[in-house]
Amino acid sequence: MNSPDSAAKFIEDVLLGADNAFAARNFEASATIYRVRLQTSFVAALINGAEEEVGFWGPAGRNRYSELLRRLGQLTSCEPCFWFYVCDSLDGLSQLGFVRAAKFEPGGDFLDVPLAQFETEPAPIGGGAYLGLLAASGKWLLLHTHYAEQEFEISVNGPSKLCDDLCRLARSTSCAVE
């Protein structure tokens, strides 16, 4: 994949599939890096806290999430990749919202991470919203999944070695490669 259009075609053909239901399909392995249970909304979780089931660590003074992305960039040699957003509709079908090239800083950090999309276009009750960082090769995917008022999860999908290495570098708790 060398453009957002070719990445969109891959997402529609492989990840959405014929049934138009989003799933991380055709990857060798998967590992959950982070998962929290939500009792209500993101904002309520910020105020009241959330039950963290799987967590990861970062060096003192560094943003944990930025550090996770930086480590992923190191493990993948900063392979070109694409951000995309998929949201389920009220009728249960998944719809691709956008695909755009991911931008790296010189140090390996990503610029313009679109996490706010979960707030501007949230998952419907009973459905999901998915923010993905897809490798141009199609060999790996960092997936952020939000099920409205239930949970938020970050997982890595791809070769077993990549999943194992990212779990180890992020010092993820309870990270198990499936």
Image (cartoon, rainbow, N blue to C red):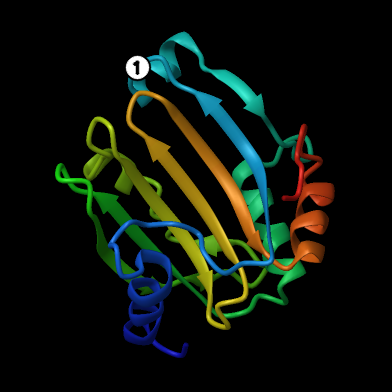
Amino acid type, mark 1: Thr
Q: Quadrant of residue 7?
A: bottom left
The image shows a total of numbered marks equal to: 1
Seen from this angle, which residue lies furthest front? Answer: 19
Kindly identify the residue that appears in the image at 75 percent across and 36 percent down.
Answer: 57
User: Residue at label 1?
Assistant: 40
Residue 108, visible in the rendered structure: yes
Location of residue 18 (image quadrant): bottom left
x then y, percent, for residue 66: 61, 50
- The spot of residue 127 in percent (x, y) is 29, 39
Q: How far across and how far down the image is residue 175, in percent?
A: 75, 40
Residue found at x 44% / y 57%:
23
Q: What is the x, y in percent for residue 27?
A: 62, 67
In depth, the one of 66 and 1 nearer the eye is 1
Q: Nearer the viewer, residue 37 or 60?
A: 37
View extreme (bottom): residue: 2
Q: Residues within 10 Å of mark 1 (few under 14, many from 20)?
A: some
Residue nearer the viewer, 77 or 135 = 135
Does the rendering let one see residue 63?
no
- Residue farthest along the top direction in this orientation: 48
Q: Residue at x 66, y 75 (%)?
A: 78
